[in-house]
Image (cartoon, grey):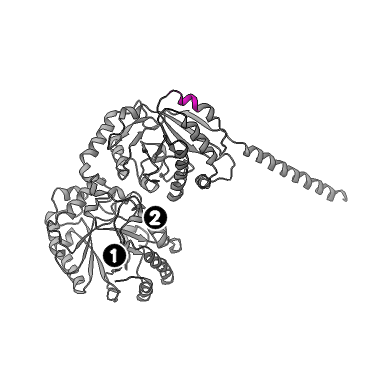
Amino acid sequence: MKSKPLFYILISIIVCFAIIALFHFSKSFYAKDKPDEIYETPSQPIFGIYDRHQRMSNEKASDLKHFVIKWNNASEESSISKQLPTILKQNADVLLTIEMWSKIGEAYSSHGILQGMVNGDYDKKVKKFCKDLSASQSNIYLRWNPEMEVPITKYQWQSQSYYLYINAFRHFADLCKKISPKVKIVWGPSGYAGSLEFYPGSDIVDVASITLNHPPGSLSTKYPAEASVPTQIKRKLHRLRFIDKPVFILGSAEVKKDSFQQKWLDIAIQDIQKDTAVIYSQNNFGSENSDTIQKANSALQLGLYDPKQQLIHQPLVTVEHIFADWGNIQDGTFKKIFNDVISRNHDVIVTIEPWKSKNLPNDKDVLNNTLKGSYDGVIKELYNVISNINHMVYLRWAHEMEIPVERYAWQNQDPVTYIKAYRYVMTFNKNKAKNIRNVWGPTGDRGALDWWPGNDVVDYISLAIYGLPNKDITDHNKQETFSTIFKRKYNRMRFVNKPIFITEFGVKGPQSYKRKWLDDAAATINKNPQIVGVCYFNFSDVPKAWGKIEPPDWSITKETFLHFTEQLEHVK
């Protein structure tokens, strides 16, 4: 019996030594760097280039040899240094795609790869690599951590914050340009919705690229791929139209070189050129720096969508929001509601939902029918009602067009068709009544700028900010703050130069939670002079839109509303 304690002690010592030995073994195993790799890739052929200014021909672009370089560690000593001279010695122009990967067992998360670049962990490696490139006489195009915008995790740098990716990209590109200024830096999104959110800046990017039917894109089904390759090319190029850079068109394992037809690219480019006057008009573009968005020169407009008229009589309210469809205009309902608002001495946000007319109760092709003139009579009556009065009218037509759902007939349609229809309605009033302001009304979701109709037909950008944006969230405590949502959506507008009118915002939950959420909203509004107006949605959403679950009720009490308004600065 006396030997049992000694036995247990010996077992404990053996187990401890085993654990220590295993720890050192695993540490030694995982600390061993996986070597870097470089190989020519037939799976991403270069089909050609789209260049508005014809700085490079399709032939020259398609002659580029494409190599993938996998950096599997942060060490500057790499076997690639020995292989590069052989590749570059051929004096052929090359596209080099760098993919950064954590070594096995390393503490780096996918977040850490980008942060490691920002922190300088890879500086020696980047400098050594770019110094090796500087000796080449060839044209070298360097593409770093591509397809970053696709919301999956096939690559370790995907599904990360846009500002972290941008900072990491710029750090990499700055280092390389200083050492090898002849190298051309390629920004390589897939061309997925929301690509521009990750654009690092024209000062650092020489060329962009898109990828056709690449697996990362096809793995995300929220924005499914287009039916044909020409349509896909056109759509992906359209998403990059704010970037005045040449764009490489790359293939994939799904669109191989031997299956690609040159006419697909020709068709896509011809379609783009056909609509150049609309989508590439010089009147269409602003600045890519959000700091230059126009500041509000007047006091803040405070508004409400308040169909039960519970809060609209509060003294600080200056504008009311009303919604109407074609049928409301035709039967006179809109005119009555509009005149009621004017009688209360308020300005008006008029959101026109262009459907449900007498002749077409549910027009699923409303954009094309608008362009055909099917609604000219209704549009004329709309302008007759809202023009030349002593109050400002903020006209918002076919809103939330970018959301990939089918709540409205004009949502998730061809952006060029939407742009033409929006311009048709906003320029219909040839007299240009001085009291009307044109409001372009995306929600502010991914890819909203695909539907940007042009500076000349937009006076204000409208955003919608709801703490509970979709059916996936039912717990009010899981709602995002106003400031978080605004920051994300505001960044998406950084390529256009217009003031912001938040025509819809609201929050779900008990009044105590709503008050806290609105405290954050007021602080955000005060800090952003680009916001010229805000309009609270004092009602519940349409039940049909939420299916089997109860629609959110964003209504607030008079006390909560007054608490919110007391915190606002510069209210009109």
- Relative image position of residue 170 (x, y in whole percent): 44, 45
Amino acid type, label 2: Arg
Amino acid type, label 1: Asn
Q: Earlier in the sequence, mark 2 or mark 1?
A: 1
Asked if the magenta segment contains residue 88, the reply would be yes
Marks 2 and 1, Cα distance to the nearest angstrom? 24 Å
**Among the 4 quarters of the image, the one containing residue 55:** top left
Q: 312 or 569: which is nearer to us?
A: 569
Asked if the magenta segment contains residue 428, the reply would be no
Q: Is residue 10 left or right of residue 396?
A: right
- Relative image position of residue 135 (x, y in whole percent): 47, 29
Residue 291 appears in view? yes
Residue sitting at 49 percent across and 24 percent down?
86
Dot 2 corresponds to which residue? 488
Provide the residue span drawn in magenta: 84-90
Residue sitting at 48 percent across and 28 percent down?
39
Q: Which mark is residue 297?
A: 1
**Among the 4 quarters of the image, the one containing residue 56:** top left
Q: Which mark is residue 275?
A: none
